[in-house]
Amino acid sequence: MTEFQPRVFSGVQPTGNLHLGNYLGAIVNFVALQNSHDCIYCVVDMHAITVWQDPAELSRQIREVTAAFVAAGIDPVKHIVFNQSQVSAHAELAWVFNCVARIGWMNRMTQFKDKAGKDKENASLGLLAYPSLMAADILAYKATHVPVGEDQKQHLELTRDIAQKFNNDYAASIAGHGFGDAYFPLTEPLITGPATRIMSLRDGTKKMSKSDPSDYSRINLTDDADQIAQKIRKAKTDADALPGETEGLKGRPEADNLVGIYAALSGLTKQAVLGEFGGQQFSAFKPALADLAVQKLGPVGAEMRRLMADPGHIDQILASGAIRADAIARPILDGVKDVVGFIRRN
């Protein structure tokens, strides 16, 4: 069996308003993975334009995501941070995968159905082929692991399907070029912990979202201490006291969400949080949660604002990361071209 070097890849879209859900569901895990894996973290700006983006705003948002990575603790020297469009291997490999993947596979993607809505004929071709580009993002580096939330598991399964079909379709050529019995790994998911789904502060049944029209539904990473505290004070709750056991959170989505946020920010279990606050009213719990959120998120937001004030420095981080990412992806893409039968410059 072909062995692949362990490597983590993940990306975040630069579509504005990075919030607590992005931080706890993704970025915190990115930071932790640095201690155990070689990591490549990408701002996936090519994915962002599957729906129209204002060019000036897109540039700002690419820098904001980069600032969030660095402010949260991702080390762009030890690991790689870059934006997708600076490494052409993503687009080139995506075309090969467009020819490997089947239209039926794309039509089954629930995210396409959700984003395209009823007017599929008016959706961009890029939105339909989005998962093929995602597969290219991952496999351009032969990444063995990707941290994913529940909403991305289907795309990772498609990445595995594309890798398997490529390995099967070109098995003879792969072996003939000395690449063994498989060119691409079947990438494994790194399922993140219990805090992966942070819900809206206004509706505990809906995921916290950057697209929600109410800014009070989310805590943005750029919010200052007063904004964070105010949003938690105004967060929707019910009239009952907090239960003493996690079983008592069933059927109480807003209570469950706030306890989950406290648990994630403090590194405790929900049961440990209820052990401290069970029996208390939200009038006592919310100030404690606000203090904790300000303590944990305040420094991240302050550092983001400092970094955003120096866009040239952020651009240097992205350029350096892109050079290092290209150095990994280019030989892998060259191998794909050889396997497929393309003639390329040496």
Image (cartoon, rainbow, N blue to C red):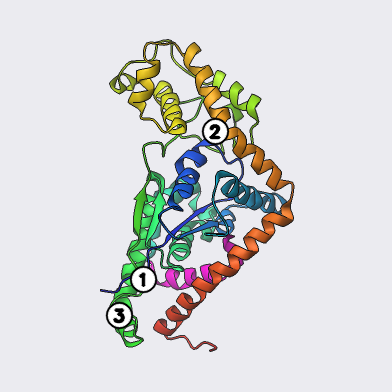
Residue stretch in magenta: 81-101
Mark 1 highlights which residue?
A: 184
Q: Residue at x 36, y 20 (%)?
A: 274
Distance between mark 3 and mark 1 Cα atoms: 10 Å
Disc 3: CA contacts within 10 A as few (<14), some (14-19) or many (>=20)? some
* Residue 239 location (% of width, % of height): 43, 10
Mark number displayed over residue 296:
2
| Quadrant in which residue 194 is drawn | top left
- Disc 2 or disc 3, which is closer to the eye? 2
**Which of 174 and 3 lies nearest the eye of the viewer?**
3
Distance between mark 2 and mark 3 Cα atoms: 48 Å
Residue 270 seen in the figure:
yes
* Residue 205 location (% of width, % of height): 42, 28
Horizontally, is 138 left or right of 217 in the view?
left
**Which of 196 and 303 lies nearest the eye of the viewer?**
303
Horizontally, is 99 left or right of 82 in the view?
left
Q: Earlier in the sequence, mark 2 or mark 1?
A: 1
Mark 3 highlights which residue?
A: 180
* Residue 66 vertical placement versus 264 (above, below): below
Horizontally, is 215 left or right of 331 in the view?
right
Q: Residue at x 43, y 22 (%)?
A: 254
Q: Amino acid at mark 3?
A: Gly
Disc 2: CA contacts within 10 A as few (<14), some (14-19) or many (>=20)? some
Distance between mark 2 and mark 1 Cα atoms: 39 Å
Disc 1: CA contacts within 10 A as few (<14), some (14-19) or many (>=20)? many
